[in-house]
Image (tube, helix red, strand yellow):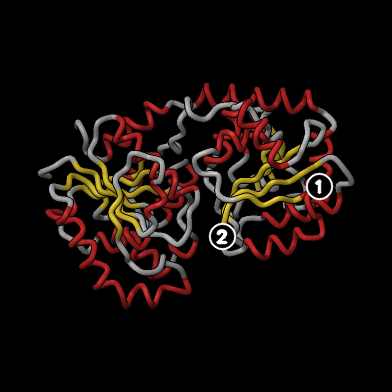
Amino acid sequence: MGGDRIVSIQTTSERGGAEYANVDLLEALAERGHDVVLLTNIPELAAGTSVPVREIDLGPKLARRSAVRVALQAPLSVLRIARALRAERPVGAVLVSFKKEQLLLSLLPQRLTGLVVWAEWGPVPAQMRRGPARTAYAFAARRARRILAVAEGTADTIVGAGVPRDKVVVMPDLVNLHRIQFDAAGRAELRRSWEVDESLLVVGCIARFQSRKRNDVLIDAMAHIDRGVVLVMAGEGEEEQALRRRAAPYGERVRFVPNVRGHVASFLSACDLLAFAPSPTEADRPRVIAMAQLVGLPILATDPEGAEAVSLSGAGTIVSPHNDPAAFAAALEAYRDDPERRRREGENGRRAMLASYDPERVLTAVEQALGLGV
């Protein structure tokens, strides 16, 4: 294609798992000697990494409420992408993660884009698997050399959206096994700043604050717990103020902290348990679960979506009834009163993660998809 530069285009309205997963993938490729660059409207996504960033504004993220606006701005957005890619020549491959960029890239010639590779960090939304949206997705996918799917369930939704199976490569989320581990000093420092001692069960949650994530269940569970539990919510999103209002009756028993990017290992180390409140379309073994297992935390999930492997490996619990605050509270109290169980399940999770996860295999699959060294 005339060059080996990998250009990733990722414009978004938020900072979450998919955004950071893409940046971490680019950084890992850079560490292996590849020439990478990120085009984004949020440069701070790459803060603290070695990934070069160029700013680009492509308007709002594609969603139901923004679909008309995105369509009207499409000609201008295509021109902006073309101009940005010309500035990065020679381009060997373009890596895109979000639907808007995937659709827009299909309108540009291959001599400008090089190989086109998509990364799907979660299931294709249901609305993209039917009607005109499905047709558009499948048509755009014809330009993609490969589509990287974070899990088998995600791959099934890609095929369900009209993409041939042989174009889809299942690639688990990339997690740095050496960087994510228990941090005793970080635990002591954070718990001191939170003014919690070792007698309290600290329950951590790392999530986007969105309505489809059932963070409300975690907060409402506090009404059923009489003592000894502190919930620390880390993240950001449009539902943050609503969640803060919901948590107000519980005072210091529910804390909110900023996005923990850059010190996720110390945050998780300061916790005794990870609370996982998935959306209905969660990926298999989400990134936050993998990181918590590496630190040695048991997982307590409100729903099986994305968390089934946790209970199968003896590394945590999925509450039943699902998304039930009272059931979640009862499970929390059981963990609070049984530190040996927390230790045992945490060790089970770390052991399972180390045994099943091979970052070298992940990176080799990505390099092959991008046409690097092939």
Q: Secondary structure at mark 1?
A: helix
Residue with the mark numbered 2: 237
Residue at 13 percent of width and 42 percent of height: 3
The spot of residue 306 in percent (x, y) is 58, 44
Please tell me whether residue 190 is drawn above or below residue 162 in the rendered image.
Answer: above
Residue at 32 percent of width and 58 percent of height: 102
Question: Real-space Cα distance between discs 1 and 2?
Answer: 26 Å
The spot of residue 128 in percent (x, y) is 43, 63
Q: Is residue 373 left or right of residue 39?
A: left
Q: Secondary structure at mark 2?
A: loop
Please tell me whether residue 89 is drawn above or below residue 177 in the rendered image.
Answer: below
The spot of residue 149 in percent (x, y) is 41, 44
Question: Residue 327 — which label?
Answer: 1
Residue at 40 percent of width and 45 percent of height: 47
Mark 1 vs 2, N-terminal side: 2
Q: Nearer the viewer, mark 1 or mark 2?
A: 2
Q: Is residue 154 left or right of residue 368?
A: right
Please tell me whether residue 56 is drawn above or below residue 370 in the rendered image.
Answer: below
Label 1 amino acid? Answer: Ala
Question: Residue 236 — which label?
Answer: none
Count numbered badges in the picture: 2
Q: Residue furthest right?
A: 226
The N terminus - image quarter = top left
Residue at 60 percent of width and 29 percent of height: 295
Q: Which one is in front, 279 or 43? A: 43
The spot of residue 210 in percent (x, y) is 59, 60
Q: Which one is in front, 237 or 290? A: 237
Crowding near the residue tagged with mark 1, few <14, some 14–19, many ≥20 C-alpha atoms within 10 Å:
some
Q: Are marks 1 and 2 in contact (CB under 8 Å)?
A: no
Label 2 amino acid? Answer: Gly
Please tell me whether residue 190 is drawn above or below residue 234 in the rendered image.
Answer: above
The C terminus - image quarter = top left
